[in-house]
Amino acid sequence: MQTIALIPDGISRSLYIKECSGTMNVQEQTLVNELNKTLRNKLSKKAGEESGQETGEFPITEPPAQRQDEYDLVSGESQEKEVIRLLLLYGNSEIIFEHVNEDKEIENISVRISDFILQDILNDEIKFENVSCQKIFDEFVALQHRNEIPDKDFFLYHPDHEISSFSIDVTMTPYELSGNWEKNQITVNHESERLKNSVVSAVLAFKAKKIERMLEEVQRKIKETTDEAEQMILLDQLIKLKQTSMMINDQLGRIIIR
């Protein structure tokens, strides 16, 4: 674990973890837990050296060693974590979008990933259910308003141990892709090469889950109310939400099958 912890690139570390798991016949989550211990201790030691004070180790809360979560469209928390993971690892990177100008010519516009994710989610006024995810998102927004661009180290060395610990976990945990993603050759190995698709699909999946929850809530209210006027209002909301859901999932489907 000491050797793997020296590897600066998170994706490369994940690949080494996967390889060690197969070679040693040890569950990946067990190795991830040990690696996160090592990284926390290194961060604590470095923070102490920079401040000239001794610091205790970061508090460690470990999940049980088990098969890691699949990255799919089922778990709302996994989608929230994926958005934050991309913000932390690639927030300062840029992706290219095509734009048709007034002369009907296609222009390439470069957009910083953190700007794209923050503005897209803020425009839709969506909140994270995971407290740590919301904390990190809010801090990104506050720093953006001050024209400051944080990198992942800002959060890995964050004075709030909840944020630093969560940041280490979310950037280190190797997500296992669901069967549909593997079938379409979307793998962690190629994430840096497919960065635009990864970012856009993560945001769309995040929104799709939120819309799904809203649909369930409206349907519940329709069943419970006996007021016809309220039922008509709720049915109108239901139709609009279903249209939005179809549009988001259609966009997400086009990205996945490319």
Image (spheres, grey):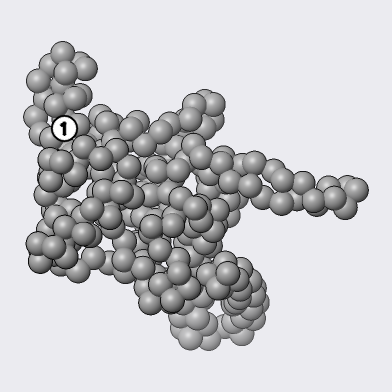
Q: Residue furthest top?
A: 52
Where residue 217 appears, as percent x and y from the top left, is 46, 74
Quarter-wise, where is residue 73 in the image?
Answer: bottom left
The quadrant of the picture occupied by the N terminus is top left
Horizontal placement of 107 versus 252: left or right? right
On screen, 168 above or below 67? above
Quarter-wise, where is residue 46 in the image?
Answer: top left
| Number of residue marks | 1
Can residue 156 be seen from the camera position used here? yes
**Residue drawn where x is 90% and y is 48% of the image:** 103
The quadrant of the picture occupied by the C terminus is bottom right
**Residue drawn where x is 64% and y is 41% of the image:** 110
Q: Mark 1 sits on what residue?
A: 42
Q: Residues within 10 Å of mark 1 (few under 14, many from 20)?
A: some
Q: Residue furthest front?
A: 23
Can residue 61 be seen from the camera position used here? no
Quarter-wise, where is residue 138 in the image?
Answer: top left
SS for callout 1: helix
Three-letter amino acid code of the residue under disc 1: Lys
**Residue drawn where x is 12% and y is 40% of the image:** 2
**Residue drawn where x is 51% and y is 56% of the image:** 194
Where residue 39 appears, as percent x and y from the top left, is 18, 39
On screen, 36 above or below 244? above
Between 164 and 4, the residue placed more toward the observer is 4
On screen, 140 above or below 257? above
Between 127 and 75, the residue placed more toward the observer is 75
Where residue 55 appears, as percent x and y from the top left, is 11, 25
Where residue 14 appears, as percent x and y from the top left, is 27, 53
